[in-house]
Structure formats: structure tokens, C-alpha cells
């Protein structure tokens, strides 16, 4: 998801383009999900259960918006997702 | 056509001619007969609209706001306690710039309970961001209703419009009213085009959002400036109205004998006619009396008031309202434009105001009395 | 509807809900099922607070925040207005929390049910006013600690919202859980095809307010159904059908004990033993 510029002009009233995003959420995270493609059977449960919609149908994690809640790792029946320390990716 | 009807009938007739597509309202005396008439029109097919039965005034205005968000013309009506019950939605719909038109049948506020007319309901909500106009009689209710849609929906304005009609004194009083033909109204009032402030499936939008400290004031400033533009628009719309319907109103204020007046009484609503009669009588006796009727309280016609009162020696405000512990709200507003000194509070809870009492106000002005005085 | 048939687009994205938020999952999934011709109507509450802060606007479809008490009444006007504009094949869907539904919004919902408007009302139930900091609502379960229940947590049972709407004769009502998304999706699909008032009450745990880890939301929502504290059922043609029987009622105590919000009870018992109360 590409971020948009902060509007330099305020609209006349409270109506504005739907889905306009100026900030990401990735820096909330202390741990990140990493999918082990060897174990993954592409069942889609992680995609389905992500509250933020940050795992795509083809199982790519959007780290700009993933908050690191860990629901995906817990729901995975194959233990294909591990939550790793964000510090290791700094 | 001339018809013998009351103020509520006049409003309902105008609404039918304006063809709103969604009407929602909750009954409250003395507004009720407006929505009864509208329900009859929907029933007999002379008005093609969704008539939404709601369980409260809060929902009445919310349903109107939802319909306006969908992009259609809407109307609702209320009174007194009902207007207060809507209060949250008044600021909301105004901030959202939904050009809803509403009739408020002015009614006293509890406690003590009272169904009769005074203006404490609407005046206590002067700051909610709606245009507020005050009619003097049934004819003006009809005319204001038609103009309300024009002004509220104008691209330069987009602010909801409250027509105030004194409870019983106007709402239930029968008068001869000139009712326009459909073709005249079609020439005056085009269909509503919501522009970008509506749900659009091709270009989806988010509406009614939060705006933090960095952006918040800009929305309110835009709203304020739209109100000021409405003040310029009012006389233009009235001239167009006069061209089509043959009745010319005097703008946001209506001055009577004010050009050379030394003593001016400012008032609003149904009592204005009697005030003018008293002024005429005083003139015959050599007193230079004048009456200034405020037709709009928001946007506030401060410049017009100031210009009208330049030659006056003393100015009083007569209003059916009191801001407890302060003065009347109209007086407080007028004082931002002109040095009014005497504030007369009368007509609360439907109390009559006599010609003698009005003449006494002029006498008090001549005697240099000032402050807040209760009739 | 299987996972593979679900709309791949995200309609609720980039929001600032807490990590692991059950309510945002309920809204996200619903919009994927309902599609782009849905107008989302949200009162004050968690989802509007996290999703609509100009210029960060997180709904990809048309969406509007209403006054707190006004979800259903705004939906009514919106549906009437869109229909009057000549729009077809659209859905007006409300997403209100438990407080917005069972407390302050109940009157407007009552009005909409009375009228039989063609709307879909979804209550995402996280069992307290979470957005303002975990205050008790009419749907807070007995025993749960909130920031406004000074006497041993909430003392009253949850209002039975599904029963209330059924008693009002809605066209369709269902309870669901974000722990059983397949069931929730089926119910959304069904609601899509029914005319009249549709009501779906989805249990949407709040890890922040329930005293759970952010990864436990879905698990606890599933467990609530399995141990029998939340029933999956639906109401059609005047009858209720239970969709799923509790499979492990014996785990009820463990289900309660693992939630921080209920820990006040064990603390109370301990204090009583120590003579401190």
C-alpha cells in the first residue's frame, strides 16, 4: 500500500476520498510474522484472520501495516508462521 | 391563488411544491399539523416522497441527514423540546454541511411545561451552525420555506436552514395566503444537486470523519464563511423570488420608518406587525418611532443593523427569550452591531404582548431607561 | 463462501485499532463479503475512532460516522435516499459496538425494526466501551471488571440482544463469533439476500479490555462458543436454529480464568479469606 501525501488543503466539508492513507502502522510492531514457505500449505487461514488485512491472498505480509499481533502464527495449523523479534530486523 | 390557511398548512404546501424525496418527523405540538398535512399529501399521491415514521426527534434529523448524505432533498419539522432533543444532530448535520430544511414551530421550554410559543427553543441553539430565519406570518412561512431550499442548497452555502414560526401565533392562525403555482416554483427552485457531499459508488468517499487540532479549525472557518456568503445570497434570492412570485422581502432585516427614526424597537416574529402599528400611531403623535424586524438571526446581519440605526437616539430589543443571568439572546447579539440599551422580555410561554406595552417601550426609550425589563 | 471466493480487496485497511482487535476483524470480513456497493455506517466507537481520522481514512468504500445513538436512524435515511436516487444493488450496513447497540443506540434500532427498513445492522460486541477505556455496557458479562464497575465487576447479565431483535420481528437475525469466520461469512451471505432488517451480533473480543495477549483474540472467540458462553444461532421465519453445540463445556472455568477481566473475582475471594474485605 502506497502512502499518500498529507493534503495541503482542507476540504470544504467532511467528505474526502475513501481509503486515503498517510501513515503506516509498521512501527507499532515488536515482533514480526515470518512465513516458512516450506511448511505452508496455503490454506489461507492467516490471510482470513488478520484483523488488519496485512497478509495477502498469496501470503505476502505487508510489513508497513502489520502490527505484529501474532494471530496469524496462532491460527496456523502447520506452525508455518513464527513471530520473530523486530530488533533483529532493524 | 389565495387560500385561507394557517402557518403550518402554508409550510406543508411549500414543502410539497419543493418536492423533497425523504421526509422524516416526529409529532410535537404545535408542529404536528405540518407533518400530518405532508402525510396526507404522500397518501393522496400529490407528493412523491418517502415518509419516514421515526421514534424520536433525534432520529428524525438523523434520518434526514442520512437521506441528504444519499444526495436527495430532505425536510423535517419540530418544536421546543423536540428541537432540544435534536441538539446534538443540529451541530452534526451543520458541520457535515447537509442542506436540510426544517420548520421549527417556536415553543417554550420546560420546566414549567408549556406548549405555547416563545423563542427560547431556537435562540438557545443559535450557535449550532444552522441558518435561522424568523417568519412574521403564514405567508412568510410559505415563502421562506421555498427560499430555504434555494439558500441552503446553493453551492456557495450548503448549510442547513431552520425556518422559525411562532407557535400558535403563526402555526395555527388562519390568514389569507397567496399559494404559488407549481410552474412558478419549478422556475425558482431547481432540483437538488448534492455534488461531492454524497455517497457515490463510482468515487467512494468517507464522510463525517474526525479532524484533529491541525485541521479542525479549517472546517469550522469554512462553515462560518459559508454562512457569511449566505448573508450576501439572501437579498439576491429574494429579488429572484419577487420576480417570479411578486413579493419582495427586505433582506435579512426589515426596517419600518427607520430612516429618520430617533427611537427604534428591534424585534422578530409575529409580534412585529403590532409593533409597526404602534410606531405608526406614535408617528402621528410626533414621536419619531421606527421598528426593525430581524428576519435572520444566523447569519447575523450586523452590518445591516448598524447601518439602519446610525441616526437613532435610543434602541430597544423586544424578544420572547431570556438567557438566564444575562440578557435576552437577541439583545446580546444586537449589541455587537449597535448600542441598544433597553431589553424587553415578553411573550414567554405564549403570553400576549399588547399595543399598550409596546407603546410603553417607546416611552421608556424616550425617558432614557435601560437594562433588562420584563413585561 | 470459501476463503478462495472471498473478495481479495481490503475495504478496511490502515486503521489504528489495537493489535489483535476483534472488532476490526469483524468489520474487515463483513466488508469483504458485502462488497464495494456497501455504505458502511458507524457511530462513535472503536471502529470509527480508529478508522476515520482525517486525512487517514481507512474505509475503501463509502462510509459515514453517525452520532453515537444514530446508527439505525441514519441508515434508514440513507437507504431511502439512495433508493430514491434510483440506486440499485447497494447495501446499507451499520457497524456499532455493544454500547452503541444495546445502550445508546437501542431506541433508534427499535425505530428501524418497527419500520422494517432494508438495512443490515452488525453489532461487534467486545463487551464494554473499549474506545473510552473499558467502561461497562449493557453487554458486559457478569463478573467482568471494567473501569466503571466498582463493586466486584459487572453484576448483571448481558442484555439478550438477539432475543430483543427477534421479538421485534426482524427478517433475519444471527449471532456469530470472529472465532468461527466460516459461520460468520455464511450469515453475512444470507443477510445479503434477505430484504428487511437484518441483525448480526458478532462476538469480537478485545485483547486490551479482556486482559489477553494480542494473539489470543480468535482463539478466545472460538473458545467462548466451544465452552458455551456464546451461542452461534440464527433466526429465520420466526424460529431460532442453533448452529453449533458447545463441544467442551468442561473447559468453562479455564476459559473464564484466563481472561484478566475476570481475575477480580479470584482476587476478591483471596482478599475475603485474608480478612481484608
Image (cartoon, grey):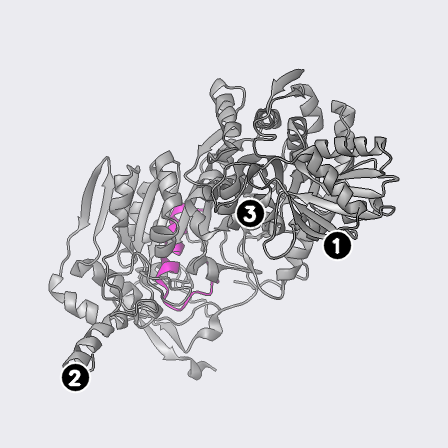
Residue at the location (34% across, 65% down)?
C206
Looking at the rendered image, the disc whose residue lies closer to the viewer, 2 or 1, is 1
Q: Is residue B241 left or right of residue B91?
A: right
- Which circle marks residue B336 in the picture? 1
Classify mark 1: helix, strand or loop: loop
- Where's residue C54, x and y in %? 57, 60
Is A2 contained in the magenta span? no
Crowding near pointer 3: few (<14 within 10 Å), some, many (20+)?
many
Residue at 38% x, 48% y is C33
Quarter location, residue B99: top right
Q: In this rendering, is residue C1 above or below B209?
A: above
Q: Does residue C1 appear anywhere in the picture?
A: no
The disc placed on residue C274 is 2
Who is closer to the viewer here, B155 or B118?
A: B118
Say left or right for B127 vs C266. right
Q: Chain of mark 3?
A: B
- The secondary element bearing badge 2 is classed as loop
**Which region is colored magenta?**
C13-35
Q: Which mark is residue B87?
A: none
The subunit carrying tag 2 is C
> From the viewer's perspective, is residue B11 above or below residue A26?
above
From the viewer's perspective, is the residue at label 1 or at label 3 nearer?
Answer: 1
Q: Residue at x 26, y 64 (%)?
A: C154
Q: Is residue C34 magenta?
A: yes
The Cα–Cα distance between marks 1 and 3, rounded to whole angstroms, is 25 Å
Which of the image's four quarters has the C terminus of chain C?
A: bottom left
Numbered marks: total: 3
Identify the chain of the residue marked 1, using the numbered disc in the image.
B
Residue C207 image point, x, y percent: 33, 68
Q: Which residue is mark 3?
A: B90
Amino acid at each position: 500500500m502506497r502512502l499518500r501525501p498529507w493534503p495541503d488543503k482542507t476540504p470544504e466539508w467532511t467528505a474526502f476520498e475513501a481509503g486515503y492513507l498517510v501513515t503506516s502502522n509498521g512501527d507499532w510492531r515488536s515482533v514480526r510474522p515470518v512465513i516458512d514457505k516450506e511448511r505452508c500449505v496455503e490454506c489461507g487461514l492467516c490471510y482470513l484472520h488478520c484483523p488488519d488485512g496485512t497478509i495477502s491472498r498469496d501470503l505476502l505480509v505487508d510489513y508497513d501495516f502489520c502490527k505484529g499481533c501474532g494471530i496469524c502464527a496462532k491460527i496456523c495449523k502447520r506452525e508455518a508462521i513464527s513471530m520473530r523479534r523486530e530488533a533483529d530486523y532493524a | 391563488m389565495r387560500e385561507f390557511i394557517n402557518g403550518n398548512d402554508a409550510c406543508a404546501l411549500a414543502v410539497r411544491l419543493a418536492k423533497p424525496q425523504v421526509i422524516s418527523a416526529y409529532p410535537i405540538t404545535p408542529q404536528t399539523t405540518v407533518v400530518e398535512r405532508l402525510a396526507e399529501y404522500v397518501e393522496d399521491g400529490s407528493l412523491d416522497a418517502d415518509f419516514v415514521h421515526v421514534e424520536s426527534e433525534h432520529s428524525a434529523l438523523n434520518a434526514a441527514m442520512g437521506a441528504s448524505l444519499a444526495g436527495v432533498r430532505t425536510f423535517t419539522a419540530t418544536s421546543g423540546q423536540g428541537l432540544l432533543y435534536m441538539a446534538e444532530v443540529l451541530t452534526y448535520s451543520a458541520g457535515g454541511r447537509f442542506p436540510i430544511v426544517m420548520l421549527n414551530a417556536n415553543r417554550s421550554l420546560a420546566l414549567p411545561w408549556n406548549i405555547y410559543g416563545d423563542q427560547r427553543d431556537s435562540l438557545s441553539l443559535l450557535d449550532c451552525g444552522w441558518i435561522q430565519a424568523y417568519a412574521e406570518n403564514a405567508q412568510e412561512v410559505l415563502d421562506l420555506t421555498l427560499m430555504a431550499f434555494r439558500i441552503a442548497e446553493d453551492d456557495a452555502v450548503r448549510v442547513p436552514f431552520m425556518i422559525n414560526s411562532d407557535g400558535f401565533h403563526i402555526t395555527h392562525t388562519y390568514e389569507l395566503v397567496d399559494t404559488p403555482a407549481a410552474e412558478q416554483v419549478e422556475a425558482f427552485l431547481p432540483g437538488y444537486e448534492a455534488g461531492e457531499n454524497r455517497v457515490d459508488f463510482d468515487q467512494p468517499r468517507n464522510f463525517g470523519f474526525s479532524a484533529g487540532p491541525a485541521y479542525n479549525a479549517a472546517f469550522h472557518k469554512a462553515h462560518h464563511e459559508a454562512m457569511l456568503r449566505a448573508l450576501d445570497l439572501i437579498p439576491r434570492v429574494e429579488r429572484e423570488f419577487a420576480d417570479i412570485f411578486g413579493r419582495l422581502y427586505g433582506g435579512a432585516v426589515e426596517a419600518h420608518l427607520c430612516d429618520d427614526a430617533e427611537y427604534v424597537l428591534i424585534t422578530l416574529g409575529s409580534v412585529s406587525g403590532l409593533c409597526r402599528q404602534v410606531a405608526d400611531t406614535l408617528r402621528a403623535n410626533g414621536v419619531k418611532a421606527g421598528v426593525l424586524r430581524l428576519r435572520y438571526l444566523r447569519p447575523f446581519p450586523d452590518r445591516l443593523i448598524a447601518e439602519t440605526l446610525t441616526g437613532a437616539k435610543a434602541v430597544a430589543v423586544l424578544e420572547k427569550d431570556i438567557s438566564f443571568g444575562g440578557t435576552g439572546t437577541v439583545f446580546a447579539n444586537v449589541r455587537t452591531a449597535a448600542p441598544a440599551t433597553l431589553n424587553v422580555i415578553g411573550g414567554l410561554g405564549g403570553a400576549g404582548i399588547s399595543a399598550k406595552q409596546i407603546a410603553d417601550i417607546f416611552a421608556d426609550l424616550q425617558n432614557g431607561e435601560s437594562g433588562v425589563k420584563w413585561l | 463462501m470459501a476463503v478462495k471466493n472471498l473478495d481479495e480487496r481490503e475495504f478496511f485497511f490502515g486503521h489504528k485499532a489495537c493489535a489483535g482487535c476483534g472488532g476490526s476483524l469483524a468489520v474487515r470480513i463483513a466488508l469483504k463479503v458485502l462488497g464495494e456497493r456497501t455504505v458502511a455506517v458507524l457511530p462513535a466507537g472503536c471502529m470509527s475512532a480508529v478508522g476515520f481520522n482525517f486525512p487517514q481514512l481507512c474505509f475503501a468504500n463509502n462510509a459515514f460516522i453517525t452520532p453515537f445513538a444514530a446508527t439505525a436512524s441514519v441508515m434508514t435515511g440513507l437507504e431511502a435516499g439512495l433508493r430514491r436516487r434510483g440506486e440499485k444493488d447497494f447495501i446499507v450496513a451499520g457497524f456499532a459496538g455493544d454500547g452503541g447497540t444495546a445502550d445508546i443506540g437501542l431506541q433508534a434500532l427499535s425505530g428501524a425494526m418497527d419500520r422494517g427498513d432494508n438495512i443490515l445492522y452488525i453489532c461487534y460486541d467486545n463487551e464494554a466501551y473499549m474506545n473510552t477505556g473499558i467502561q461497562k455496557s449493557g453487554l458486559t458479562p457478569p463478573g467482568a471488571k471494567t473501569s466503571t464497575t466498582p463493586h466486584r465487576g459487572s453484576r448483571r447479565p448481558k442484555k439478550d440482544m438477539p432475543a430483543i431483535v427477534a421479538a421485534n420481528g426482524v427478517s433475519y437475525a444471527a449471532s456469530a463469533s470472529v472465532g468461527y469466520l466460516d459461520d460468520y461469512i455464511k450469515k453475512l451471505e444470507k443477510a445479503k439476500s434477505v430484504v428487511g432488517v437484518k441483525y448480526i451480533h458478532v462476538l469480537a473480543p478485545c485483547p486490551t479490555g479482556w486482559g489477553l495477549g494480542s494473539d489470543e483474540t480468535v482463539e478466545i472467540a472460538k473458545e467462548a462458543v466451544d465452552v458455551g458462553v456464546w451461542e452461534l444461532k440464527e433466526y429465520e421465519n420466526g424460529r431460532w436454529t442453533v448452529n453449533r453445540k458447545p463441544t467442551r463445556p468442561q473447559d468453562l472455568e479455564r476459559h473464564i480464568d484466563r481472561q484478566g477481566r475476570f481475575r477480580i473475582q479470584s482476587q476478591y475471594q483471596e482478599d475475603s479469606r485474608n480478612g481484608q474485605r
